Image (cartoon, grey):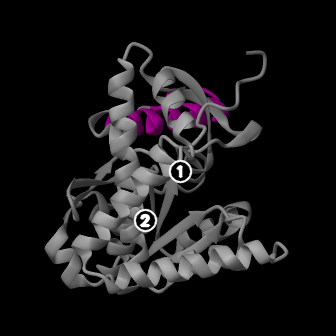
Amino acid sequence: MNKISFGHRLEYIGALAAGSLFRIIPLKFALITGSFLGWLVFMVLGIRKKVMLDNLLQAFPAMDIGQRKNIARRCARHFGMMTAEFARMPILDNRYLEKYVEFDSGDAVSDAQSMGKGGLVISGHFGNWELMGGGSSLLGYPVTYIVASQSNPLVDKLLDDYRRNLGIEILKLKTAAKGALKSLKQNRFIAILIDQDAGKEGEFVDFFGKPASTHRGAAIFHLRTGAPLIFASCIRIKGPYYRVKYEKVELKLSEGSYEQQIREITQRLTKILEDKIKMHLEQWFWMHKRWKRKPKGD
């Protein structure tokens, strides 16, 4: 565990206080407050504003600057509201899901369960992935998260406790491989977000027309275990209302090498995510430096 500093403790107290406030006030006012704070932090104080606009420029070089600023502003408000919603996760229950969240799983989930190999549920930092996972767990699905550790150990534990209290199993990214294989054997659904920089070990695939270092884990687990791939999305319709959708990922792999197949799968999943993002641009996490690393020789 990282050494706990005074700054860590201060940040943790702030997170506890903010979480308590968002849970005490009515949902409507929590979302209004979250939306305002998102706008204030990103658009007024300018935290990550430049990153957002740079990312939008890379993804849409022909788009008017006014349009990019509008998307960034709406994105800031969306993630402010999502922060409020995540803070309310400890009071999430089935009544909330029945009122605000529409689940459409088709036969993707049931077919995966019947195979007995677990499922690899793929998504990104898009919409409200935390509500999707927490809601699915409350509905009785065995959900496992693979998550990166936060730099603040106290906040890291707080976030994971929110998830565990909803029945979600937590595997940390650096040590996830063995645990993930065990979870799949137990017929669990492993949620993997594939849209953050994976470093020099990642697979460089096309994302909005540019090579992006992408985690290979989903492809590797699929090839090793035969666990089905399911793409999941949780889209904000309006205010607290969401639509969750699970879809089978159809693959037509070449007869190439193992490495080629990993690349094909990773590219296929990334393309599905990109297509979803294009339909709701304001709901993707444009604050992340997605293209900060270039392929060797570029």
Question: Most prominent secondary structure in the magenta stretch?
Answer: helix
Residue at image location 22% in from the left, 75% down from the top: 97
Disc assigned to residue 178: none
Q: Which residue is mark 2?
A: 83
| Amino acid on which the number 1 mark rests in the picture | His
The image position of residue 108, as x and y in percent, is 28, 57
Farthest residue, direction left: 99
Quadrant in which the N terminus appears: bottom right
The magenta region covers: 253-276
Q: Nearer the viewer, residue 5 or 90?
A: 5
Residue at image location 34% in from the left, 58% down from the top: 35
Q: CA distance from mark 1 to mark 2?
A: 32 Å
Farthest residue, direction right: 3
Would residue 261 be found to the left or right of residue 165 on screen? Answer: right
Residue at image location 53% in from the left, 48% down from the top: 45
Asked if 85 appears above or below 167 in the picture, the reply is above
Q: Sequence-wise, which precedes: disc 1 or disc 2?
A: 2
| Amino acid on which the number 2 mark rests in the picture | Thr
**Quarter location, residue 179:** bottom right
Farthest residue, direction top: 62
Q: Residues within 10 Å of mark 2 (few under 14, many from 20)?
A: many
* Residue mark closest to the camera, 1 vs 2: 2
* SS at circle 2: helix
Is 73 inside the magenta-drawn segment? no
The answer, for residue 166, to whether it is visible in the render is no
Quadrant in which the C terminus appears: top right
Q: Which residue is mark 1?
A: 222
The image position of residue 30, as x and y in percent, is 31, 72
Asked if 286 appears above or below 63 in the picture, the reply is below
The image position of residue 140, as x and y in percent, is 32, 81
**Quarter location, residue 174:** bottom right
* SS at circle 1: helix
